[in-house]
Image: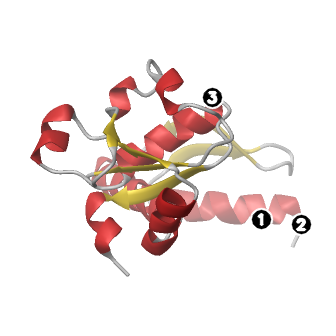
Amino acid sequence: MSSLERTTRWLTVLTSIGISGCSAASGTGMRWSAVAWSPILLVPFIVACALVYVRGVRRSYIAPAEARRLVVDERATLVDVRPAADFAKGHIEGARNIPVSQVADRIHEFGDKNHPVVVYCTAGLGAARAKTVLETAGFKKVHNLGPLGRWSEK
């Protein structure tokens, strides 16, 4: 199947589910001109995108046993990125609290960029954001444990 045929096929599919205003760009792929969404499809589309994102984040979690090994054997920095009030209600022993909204401003508190860091939060998304900020800042060994409750899993 040629690129133009593939593009035409996608345009047909998109039009059939309520997305209009797409056009093919001479066989080089799809070019969105004026995209008009059917209102009834917009919400399910946003929900589907969120689910794909969350599933992708979950797949990037470090195994709890490996996180514990890093903290014990390699003395990884363990960081709870939840708000201070949540941290005060309970956290993993030895963790320090740097809320996700402050990670960029407090980057110096994470130490050596080659030292392992394990981040966690309430549901995993805040830790994913913190991991991205740290990796963008040059940290090489950042691991997302995900939700706090995973620490005690085998």
Q: Are marks 1 and 2 in contact (CB under 8 Å)?
A: yes
Where does the image place residue 48, in percent across and percent down from the top left? Answer: 39, 60
Where does the image place residue 138, in percent across and percent down from the top left? Answer: 68, 32
- Please give the residue where the numbered disc 2 appears in the rendered image: 2
Image quarter of the C terminus: bottom left
- Give neighbour class at mark 2: few <14, some 14-19, many 20+ (Cα, 10 Å): few
- Give neighbour class at mark 1: few <14, some 14-19, many 20+ (Cα, 10 Å): some
- What residue is at 15 percent from the left and 50 percent from the top? 90
Q: Residue furthest top?
A: 105
User: Does residue 62 show up?
Assistant: no
Amino acid marked by disc 2: Ser
Where on the picture, by quarter, is residue 134?
A: top right
Counting residues from the N terminus, which is met first, the one under dot 3 or under dot 2? 2
Secondary structure state at the residue bearing disc 1: helix
For residue 50, above or below residue 21: below
- Colouring method of the image: secondary structure
Amino acid marked by disc 3: Ala
Where does the image place residue 101, in percent across and percent down from the top left? Answer: 35, 27
Counting residues from the N terminus, which is met first, the one under dot 3 or under dot 1? 1
Q: Distance between the residues labelled 3 and 1?
A: 40 Å
Q: Which residue lies furthest to the bottom in this view?
A: 154
Amino acid marked by disc 1: Arg
- Please give the residue where the numbered disc 3 appears in the rendered image: 137
Q: Nearer the viewer, residue 99 or 43?
A: 99
Where on the picture, by quarter, is residue 86?
A: top left
- What residue is at 37 percent from the left and 49 percent from the top? 125
- What residue is at 89 percent from the left and 66 percent from the top? 2
Q: Residue 6 carries which label?
A: 1
Where does the image place residue 28, in percent across and percent down from the top left? Answer: 85, 48
Secondary structure state at the residue bearing disc 2: loop
